[in-house]
Image (cartoon, rainbow, N blue to C red):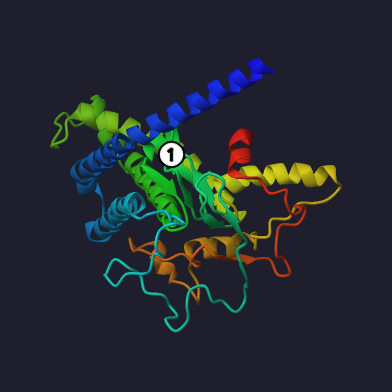
Amino acid sequence: MLCSRTVFRCFKALERLGDRITGAAGPYFVGLAALLISTGAICFFDVIMPSLSYPLITGPICILIALNLFLHYYYVCTIPPGFVDAPMQLAGTSRLWAQPLNKTRPLTWTPNLNITRANITVCRKCAQRKPERTHHCRICNRCVLKYDHHCPSLDMADGLTGINQCVGLHNERHFVMFMAYLCLSSFCFVLLGYEQLFLALGVSYRVVWPYHVPPLAYMLLYILSAVIGLAVGIMCSYHLWMIMQGETSVESQDHEHYRRVASERGETFVNSYDLGKLQNLKLFFNIGPFGYSHWTLFMPLRVQPYTDGTSWARREGYERHRGVREGEELTDDEETSEA
């Protein structure tokens, strides 16, 4: 018994040390990601862009993709995720903010959805009152509305998309949009730049390298684009799948536990936030008659979430998940031990 307690304390000490290292390394991840993105953009516009056909069409499209890539990364790094102890975040009036389609009603009002007030509990770690879907971040040491994860962590994909803060209610859309445009940019780089790769390798009929970027740098960036596109593409696909299931990264792990518990009782777990794949996507990106235009998916604009985190859309007739009884919900401590 004493030995198991000692081992547990050692693991908790290592966990706290890892949190400190991750938090301290955050700014370096952000700097590295910004450097790689900027270098890749310079390389694309110097080497690949001049060889594209129909420059009056392809040029603006490439510039728009680059703007989305840079601005969504800026947003996800600078927009607070939504801390429960912070003032409510309101929409701004600058040109970087998209305008909702229906300006006469708040975004939380939708006639065809079952909007219910969130249950309120008290966090065991910071003693803050928090609505459901809120979790305590060990690294930030604060409760985050609709907490997904803290980025960066020490895995490859998060390191490539490091933002040095939590992903939560107010910046999760920009995080997914940034990953999507990073995948698209990497795909375009690899697909459109293979001829220049052959030239850099010296296997082309052309013998002169006419670009400002050195051939070796181009080859390294080409390989890096392929690797980043694959790694971030897998991560982006995983997040989109969870969005279509109406859950976050933390909730995905919780729901697996709830399914096991419900199955042992002969019951079926039903996620009350799951309104169907298409409706879940619309709510996440907040597009539709009572949100924003579909064009906001292609423009680098800021968008408010459909809720302020104190109420959530649920399946009709549901006030909570089916198959989970009151008191069986996992706490942050239990989620950490489960993970």
Q: Position of residue 240 (x, y in %)?
A: 53, 51
Q: Residue at x 27, y 60 (%)?
A: 57
Position of residue 75 relative to residue 112, above or below, is above
Query: Is there any visible trace of residue 236 in the rendered image?
Result: no
Coordinates of residue 30 in the picture (x, y in percent): 30, 40
Q: Locate residue 156: give its quadrant.
A: top left
Residue at the image point whose x is 56% and y is 76% from the top:
110
Q: Secondary structure at mark 1?
A: loop
Quadrant of the rendering where the C terminus is positioned: top right
Left or right: 264, with 81 as reference point: right
| Residue 333 horizontal/vertical position (percent) | 59, 39
Residue 33 lies, with reference to residue 276, above or below; the image says above
The residue located at (29%, 66%) in the rendering is 96
Q: Can you name the residue that lies furthest to the top here?
A: 3
Instruction: Judge left or right: residue 230 versus residue 38.
Output: right
The residue carrying mark 1 is: 139
x, y (%) of residue 253?
63, 42
From the viewer's perspective, is residue 56 above or below residue 138?
Answer: below
* Front-lying residue, 5 or 182: 5
193 relative position to 211: left or right? right
Closer to the camera in the image, 327 or 27: 327
State whether residue 145 appears in this view. yes
Amino acid on which the number 1 mark rests in the picture: Ile
Q: Nearer the viewer, residue 261 or 179?
A: 261
At a point 47% along the width and 72% down the height, the residue shown is: 291
At label 1, counting other C-alpha atoms closer than 10 Å, the crowd grade (few under 14, some 14-19, many 20 or more) is some
Image quadrant containing the N terminus: top right
